Image (cartoon, grey):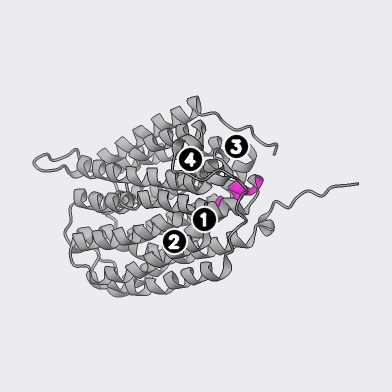
Amino acid sequence: MTTSKPPSGLRSLPRNLWAVSLTSFLTDVSSEMVLNVLPLFLANVLGAKTNVIGLVEGVAEATASLLKLFSGWLSDKLGARKWLAVAGYGFSTLAKPLFYVADAWWVVAGVRWADRIGKGIRTAPRDALVADSVPAEQRGLAFGLHRAADTGGAALGLLIALAVVWLTQRGAATLGRTAFQTLVLVSLVPAFLGVIALAVMARDAPAPVTRERPRISFRGLGPRFALLMLIVGLFDLGNSSDAFIVLRAQERGLSVVGVLGMLLTFNLVYALVSTPAGRLSDRIGRRTVVVAGWLVYAAVYLGMGLARSGLDVWALYAVYGLYYGLAYGTAKALVADVTPEHLRGVAYGAYNATLGILDLPASLIAGILWQGVGRWAGFGPSAPFFFGGALALLATALLLTVFPGKPSRRL
C-alpha cells in the first residue's frame, strides 16, 4: 500500500487563510493611504514636533496592548476567533472617518488610539485563527502568504495615495490638508469591504480538546516563549515607529510624492519576499530566517543614520522591506512553534502586547534622541537610527547564542 504525500503548496491552504488574507489586503489598502502620511500631516499641517509625533505613535500602540492580550485569552476561553477579529476590524473602520475632522495633534492621537483599539481586539484572534487552520509544516508558508497579502494591499494603497497627492498638490514638498482629507474619504471603501469579507468567508477552526482553562500567564506558555519575548523585547526597544523614517526622508529632501514612492518600493519588496521566506522557514528553521532579517534591519538602521540624501533613504527603505519579509511573519510562526496549542490566543496576545507596550518607550526615545525635550536639544536626526541598529545587533547575538534553534527539515 502506498501513502500520498500531503499537499504543501498554496492550493492546499484552507479557506480561512484566504479569508484572513483578503481582509488584511483590503484593510491595508485603506490604512496605508492614511497612516503613512499621518506623520507628515502632523508635522506639515498641524506643526507637531518629533517628540510629539513619537508620543502619538507610541501611545497609539501601547494603549491597545493589554487589549491584545485580553482578546487572545478570550478567544482561547470561548474557543472562537472569527467574530472577535471581525469586531476589531469593524471598530477600526468606524474610527477612520474621524481623521477627516482632526485639527490638532491631540485629536489625531485620539483617533489613532481608537484605530489601534480595533487592532488590539483583532490581532491575537486573527493570528491564532491562522495558526489553528494549518498544519505545523505549513505554518511558515501560511504566515508568509498572509503578510504578502497584507503588504500587497499596502502597495496598492500607496499607489492610490500617490495618485491623490499628485492630483491635489503635484510635487509639493509638504503635505496639505486637502490631500489628507481626500485620502481619508477614499480609504473608507476598502475598509468596509475588508470587514464584510472576513464576516462572510471565515469559519472558526475546531477548538483543541483540553481540560485546562486558559490563563493570562507567561508561566503556562513555557520557558522558550519567555526567553523569546525577552530577546524580541530588547530588539523592539530600538525599533521605533516607521514614522521617523518618513520624517528622515523628508528631512533629507524627498517631496511628499517621493516619500510615497519610497513607501511603495518598500511594500513591493516586503510582499515579494514574505511568502518564500515563510516557506524557507518551514524547511531550515525559523530562527535562521529571523536572524537574517534582524541583521538586515541593523544594517538599514545604521545606514539611515549615515544617509546624506533622500535617495539614500529611499534605497535603504527598499532593503528594509527585506527585513520585514524575512522576520515579521516568521516570528509569528515561531510563536506557534514554542507554545501549547490550546493557549495560542494567549500567546499571540502576549507577543503583540509586549511589542505594543514597548512601542511607546521606543518611539519616545527616538523622538527625544532626534529633537530633544525641554531645554535639551537632542543629538539630531541620526541618533535614533544608530540606537536602533545597535540594539538589533545585541538582540541578534542573544538569539543566536541563548535561544535554542529548531532542527531544519531537509530541502
Of circles 1 and 4, the one toward us is: 1
What is the CA distance from the residue labelled 2 to the residue labelled 4?
A: 20 Å
Badge 2 vs badge 4, beta-carbon distance below 8 Å: no
State the residue at coordinates (42%, 62%).
88
State the residue at coordinates (11%, 39%).
376
- Highlighted range, magenta: 137-144
Badge 1 vs badge 2, beta-carbon distance below 8 Å: no
The disc label shown at residue 198, or none: none
* Residue 371 can be seen in this image: yes
- The residue singled out by tag 4 in the image is 293
What is the CA distance from the residue labelled 3 to the residue labelled 1?
A: 32 Å
- The percent coordinates of residue 75 (x first, y second) are 49, 54
Total tally of numbered discs in the picture: 4
Query: Splitting the image into 4 quarters, where does residue 101 fall?
Result: bottom left
- The residue singled out by tag 1 in the image is 78
Q: Earlier in the sequence, mark 3 or mark 2?
A: 2
Up-down: is 56 above or below 363? below
What is the CA distance from the residue labelled 1 to the residue labelled 2?
A: 32 Å
Of circles 1 and 2, the one toward us is: 1
Q: Earlier in the sequence, mark 3 or mark 4?
A: 3
Query: Splitting the image into 4 quarters, where does residue 372 fall?
Result: top left
Q: Secondary structure at mark 2?
A: helix
- The residue singled out by tag 3 in the image is 285
| Residue 139 part of the magenta segment | yes
At label 1, which amino acid type do we have? Leu
State the residue at coordinates (36%, 49%).
65
At label 2, which amino acid type do we have? Ala
Q: Earlier in the sequence, mark 3 or mark 1?
A: 1
Q: Earlier in the sequence, mark 1 or mark 2?
A: 1
